[in-house]
Amino acid sequence: MSDPVAQLAELPAKNCKVQKVQPAVFASDAEVNIITVTVVCPDGATHKIRAYREQAQAVREFVRTET
């Protein structure tokens, strides 16, 4: 499994945008075990990036600060 934060970091180069984060990043700072980020690219492709446990926390922080 590749690093989900690294996958998200590649998005600006591809002009892709975060469309949806589940559970919502700002809804709660409670510990989450799974996070799913839906990404849409200009070519119409939709990608889902899923992170678990410690990586989920890192993804939430990345989305909160970088997007």
Image (tube, rainbow, N blue to C red):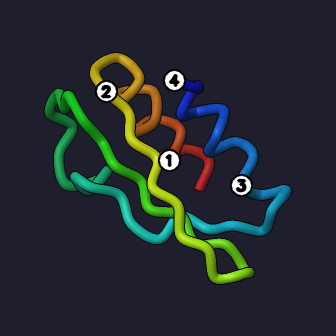
Left or right of 29? Residue 12 is right
- Marks 2/3: CA distance? 20 Å
Q: CA distance from mark 1 to mark 2?
A: 15 Å
- Residue pictured at 71% horizontal, 54% vertical: 11
Looking at the image, the residue that sits furthest to the top is 54
Are discs 1 and 2 less than 8 Å apart at CB? no
User: At x 59% / y 56%, what residue is drawn?
Assistant: 67
Q: CA distance from mark 3 to mark 4?
A: 18 Å
Answer with mark 1 or mark 4, whichever residue precedes in sequence: 4
Quickly name the residue at label 2: 52
Rendering coords of residue 26 (x, y %): 28, 53
The circle drawn on residue 63 is: 1
Q: Which mark is residue 11?
A: 3
Question: Percent from the top left, x then y, of residue 15?
Answer: 78, 68
Judge left or right: residue 14 versus residue 3. Answer: right
Residue, x 58% and y 26% (percent of image)? Answer: 2
Identify the mark nearer the N-term, 3 or 4: 4
Local packing at callout 2 (Cα closer than 10 Å; few below 14, some 14-19, many 20+) is some
Whether residues under marks 3 and 4 lie with C-beta atoms below 8 angstroms apart, the answer is no
